[in-house]
Image (tube, grey):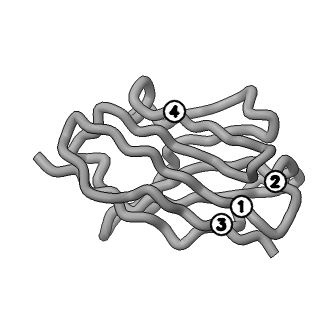
Amino acid sequence: QVQLVESGGGLVQAGGSLRLSCAFSGRIFNMYYMAWFRQVPGKEREFVAGINRSALSTSYADSVKGRFTISRDNGKNLMYLQMNSLKLEDTAVYYCAARPYWRAEYDHWGQGTQVTVSS
């Protein structure tokens, strides 16, 4: 059974940086596409960034392009989200997600980590 555990969230001032980590366990990490999503109360969960199995291909929501960087370390079963130039509107619960390469939908989720950006 896949388990995902996020860490690294917290309170940061606007313009600052945070790095989120996601620890993956239970299956073979490099068989999974990975992604970060985020959600604020009253809104749907939204895609932030995704990375393929080899880490050679990434994708980003327009709202975070140029500020956030997704990466993974297949040797350590870890995924990261480096968040720079944080804005108030980046405040959300951030979730790590995984899907095996044969599925189109993300079907494994972490518990989430809160990121709060203050003015």
- Tag shown at residue 69: 4
- Tag shown at residue 9: none
- Give the residue at mark 3: 4
Q: Earlier in the sequence, mark 2 or mark 3?
A: 3
- Give the residue at mark 1: 24
Q: Earlier in the sequence, mark 1 or mark 3?
A: 3
Q: Residue at x 10, y 46 (%)?
A: 119
Q: Earlier in the sequence, mark 2 or mark 4?
A: 2
Check the image and report above or below for 99 versus 111.
above
- Tag shown at residue 29: 2
Check the image and report above or below for 74 versus 24.
above
Type of amino acid at the residue the image marks with label 1? Phe
Type of amino acid at the residue the image marks with label 4? Thr
Mark 3 secondary-structure assignment? strand
The residue positioned farthest toward the top in the image shown:
66
Q: How many marks overall? A: 4
